[in-house]
Amino acid sequence: MQAKMNLIKTSLIAFIAMAIVSCSQSELPVYKNADKSITERVNDLLKRMTLEEKVDLVGGNGMKTMANRRLGIPEMVMTDGPLGPNTKKHSTNYSAMINLAATFNTDLMYSVAEQIGAETRIYGRNMLLGPNINVARAPHGGRVFEGFGEDPYLISEMAVPYIKGVQSKRVITCTKHFVANNQEWNRFDVSAEIDERALREIYFPAFKTAVQNADTWTIMAAYNRFRETYACENSYLLQDVLKDEWGFTGVTVSDWGGARSTVPMANSGLDLEMPFGKYYGEKLLKAVKEKEVSEDIIDDKARRILTVMFKAGLFDESIDTYGGHSDDAGRRRLAKKVADQSIVLLKNSNNYLPLKTDGIKTIAVIGPNGGEAIMTGGGSGKLMGNYEISPYEAISNKVGDQVEVKFARGIPARSLDMPIAGPEFYLTKEGEPGIYAEYFNNKEVEGEPVLTRIEKAIDFNWGWGTDRNDGSPGSPEPGIIRINKWSARWTGKFRSPGDGWYEIGLRSDNGVRMYLDQEKILDAWIDGKSGKFKVARYKFEKERWYDLKVDFYENIGSCRCRLGFTPYNPGTMTNDAVKLAAKSDVVILSMGLDKEMEGEGVDRKSLHLDEDQLKLIQEVLKVNKNVVMVLNGATPIIMSDWIDKVPVVIDALYPGQEGANALADIIFGDVNPSGKLPLTFPKDENKTPVAQTYPGTKELADYSEGIFVGYRWYDKENVEPLFPFGHGLSYTTFGYSDLKLSSTEIDKNDTLKVTLTVKNRGTFDGDEIVQLYVTDKEASVEREVKSLKGFERVSLKAGESKTIIFKIAKDALSFYDVKTKSWLAEPGDFEILIGASSGDIRLKQTFNLK
């Protein structure tokens, strides 16, 4: 009886509690009621907002949106990506996105994205600026490490799990940069001239997939112009295609400082200006009141932002509720798995790898990347891991006391900072203290200067401009020289800092050139990394005065130019490394790129390694042929000077915080390499798809290669690359057989089933990445020789076989018909190609499309 009474009492309490909650919910404003639909909540909130509050919402506030205390509208708090939350704190570096692409593993991408989302919340952010799904068109591209390579199908397939994984943690993704942000050279202004077919077949697919298959919540518009109009105010891109044609319901966001206007931008579909409301603040409010922008347009922008906030749960939970630590055992294991699956074995003559410790007494780790963890490219996309381990440390740990491991850097480190030259180093041509300055209101140092004067030294930091920082002029003379798009020339005499070799450079945010005695010693006339020194080496004579000329231009953003120098003395570094190589059984040459050589704001000038590295390689190879070459970097490296002289080449790309441990495991055979190149490596940088058009002339990038990007161009021109797209070796061999098609003739509405068998014929367990390409054999327009339309990563024990199944539908057979403005799959013969890379096709079979 007592138990029954207790049950009744408990039920009554629960009923009363539910009634109270229900009553409480019904008394809430609709937008605060979590039981209502997102549409109802957004509509209710919009009705309560004033025009001024809506305008506040569409202009940024640094790395977040404006909060509204009156109505309780929260902030979208942002962090750079896409490798992970790039806050001031450290977070897990699973690898660069180019490594995830090299895994060809969409399930692994989803697992990583989930953790990226979780860590973003741990650090108090609810919006991540990623993924970057721009195509790696130019092999020089500084931001290639942030993306998924050169092929639109691969990029699309990796983008979907990235977006879904991050957003599963109710973190807002910001897919970027829409569209054709394919080079850093003059990235703020260059106009990408792309024909409609190339746009639809190469540059749009991943963005369309992100919208329609992954429901990305926001999309970032690019800095550059597209067909002469800036992307942030390009109505064809933002309104006609993205919103009207593809049905994008999310928020379009400007890149930081990419906004250039008020009315054109507002009327063209840009929803949120970042980082501040320079054009969407008072200027936008004024434009609405003067009927240049309708209030309906403002409502649409506010509606989109609020909808995303509700989708991410920002009204119903606090980001402060997400606790935990970024660094844990599970994330470490995941980072190791990515590195294991992404490192690419490019060459392995006579099965030189894996190494056996038996018979090896000494290993030399030599090179600039051997003594540090190379995890990332540079710029806003860089990400430092929770910890780091160098190849030297990882290899030493791996072999323990069995083998003696020693390290030598071999070349001097580049000067990332140096003392600034003071006034005592400058004289005018007339012999007076200082240097003659001319300022121009254009970027080309052309025409008559608008201001001339004598200055004490080349040591300036003009800041961002008062529109972004109060008290920061952004100009040498506000009112005379504008804040953006101006240039300067300084001429005079420069006193020698001493006798011998020096590094001399300019810390500059944009383009610089330097001449000594009429010789151009430094040429960096492109938009460069903010605040980084551009450095040259020069041999000075003691107590000499040199004729000096320095040109500088400012585009947009922060603005500084400072001249500095430091003694350059390589000492015995190279000699010491060569001596170590000579007495070692095996040399691990750890070379390549790093965050100072490629990244946001800087494309590579050359695809070759720098002179210091090439010299070191040549000297080491003179004394030891047992060389394992390990490269870092996202972009291709020309290897013609040395590749025939080394038995092994490994491309580690940027393998994250566990990269060195994975490298050691691969070298010694505990992990079988399985990564595949997500882009093509050329033999000659003068024979690439963009050799004749990159970087372009002044402010025009001519995409005249059309659809023939990456491997498509090499196929079309019958040019053999150094390593083809999809290439990667294993310690075992895989056999392909039994290719079967479900039919030899299909209708346009049919799906073709493709099956084949893959067998591990070797003695190592391993993973193979099977790639499916399609060829249209009877097209009425020029089509690619083949294009990737499917891939499958398969794990096989030694001797094991598995059946692989692909499904091919009309979309995989279609091209964009510019006449009808639609996708067309023409009747005729098509060929299914199955390969281990785009250059290693193993099986073929033809079918007919009715």
Image (cartoon, rainbow, N blue to C red):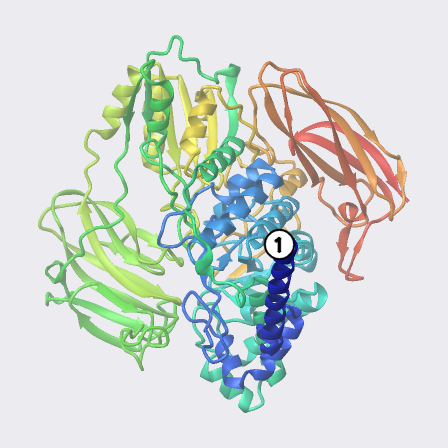
Q: Residue at x 50, y 31 (%)?
A: 340
Q: Residue furthest bottom?
A: 290
Q: Position of residue 762 (x, y in %)?
A: 62, 15
Q: Position of residue 659 (x, y in %)?
A: 43, 34
In the visual, does 589 lie left or right of 223? left
Question: Which quadrant holds the C terminus?
Answer: top right
Query: Is 538 placed above or below 402 here?
Result: below
Query: Is 522 placed above or below 742 here?
Result: below
Dot 1 alpha-carbon crowd within 10 angstroms: few under 14, some 14 to 19, many 20 or more: few
Can residue 637 be seen in this snapshot? no
- Name the residue tied to disc 1: 2
Q: Residue furthest front?
A: 1
Q: Nearer the viewer, residue 357 or 784?
A: 357
Q: Residue at x 86, y 34 (%)?
A: 742
Q: Position of residue 318 (x, y in %)?
A: 48, 63
Amino acid type shown at disc 1: Gln
Query: Is 2 placed above or below 189 here?
Result: above
Q: Quadrant of residue 832?
A: top right
Q: Quadrant of residue 784?
A: top right
Query: Is 229 placed above or below 80 here?
Result: below
Can residue 629 be seen in this snapshot? yes
Q: Nearer the viewer, residue 795 or 786?
A: 795
Q: Residue furthest top?
A: 359
In the visual, does 780 lie left or right of 209? right
Q: Nearer the viewer, residue 488 or 746?
A: 746
Task: Count numbered badges in the picture.
Answer: 1
**What secondary structure is marked by label 1?**
helix
Q: Nearer the viewer, residue 407 or 322?
A: 322
Q: Position of residue 128 (x, y in %)?
A: 49, 57
